[in-house]
Amino acid sequence: MSHAHSHDDLPRPPLYMIGALMVLTVILAGLGGLGIMPREAVPEVARAEAGTSATASRTLFFRDEADGGILIVDAASDETITRYAPGTGGFIRSTMRSLVHHRRLQGIGAVTPFTLTRWNDGGLTLADPETGRSVELVSFGRDNEATFGELLGETT
């Protein structure tokens, strides 16, 4: 039994197209890295250019409880908005873990509240004024966005 292998039957044009696509990908990535092409949209800049304004805003503390629950508190009134029992509120938990992780990396504590803002273009943003990071919640789907919208008193 022979183990000889031959590629004589492979058509060349598709191989050339794959090679060209790879080269184009590397070029476009390089242009983004050099700043010739913008790498990402900056929501704050896009909103300013479009004249978008806030329609509702609330500052919030997210506090871990000893039993694993999360308490969400209005920073202005110190009033409890809601509580998520252990094992519930998965989207809120994962979103907050990401933002809190960046605070910890920079040695920032939980003194400053997060800001939740609804925009007149329908956007919903959770921002951390300490790190400058923000999460555009509409990009995670309507159900996940609505979870945070409820913290502004919105109903679905």
Image: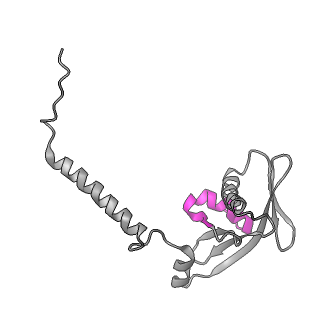
Q: Tell me residue 139's x, y (percent).
A: 55, 62
Q: Tell me residue 83's x, y (percent).
A: 81, 55
Q: Residue at x 78, y 70 (%)?
A: 112
**Which residue sits furthest left?**
8
Magenta segment: does it hold 10?
no
Say which quadrant the N terminus sits in.
top left
Q: Is residue 26 left or right of residue 103?
A: left
> Can residue 141 be seen in the rendering of this structure?
no
Q: Is residue 43 left or right of residue 81?
A: left
Colouring chosen for the image of the structure: one colour
Q: Residue at x 38, y 74 (%)?
A: 36
Q: Tell me residue 77's x, y (percent).
A: 86, 72
Residue 103 to residue 120: above or below = above
Residue 85 to residue 1: above or below = below
Q: Tell me residue 54's x, y (percent).
A: 65, 79
Which quadrant would residue 80 be assigned to in this image? Answer: bottom right
Which quadrant would residue 39 be assigned to in this image? Answer: bottom left
> Can residue 18 be seen in the rendering of this structure?
yes
| Viewer-proximal residue among 32 and 137 | 32
Q: Is residue 56 left or right of residue 137?
A: right
Q: Residue at x 15, y 49 (%)?
A: 13
Q: Is the magenta region chiefly helix, strand or loop?
A: helix
Magenta segment: does it hold 144?
yes
Segment tinted magenta in the rendering: 134-156
**Which residue sits furthest top?**
1
Say which quadrant the C terminus sits in.
bottom right
Residue 125 to residue 45: above or below = above
Q: How many marks?
A: 0
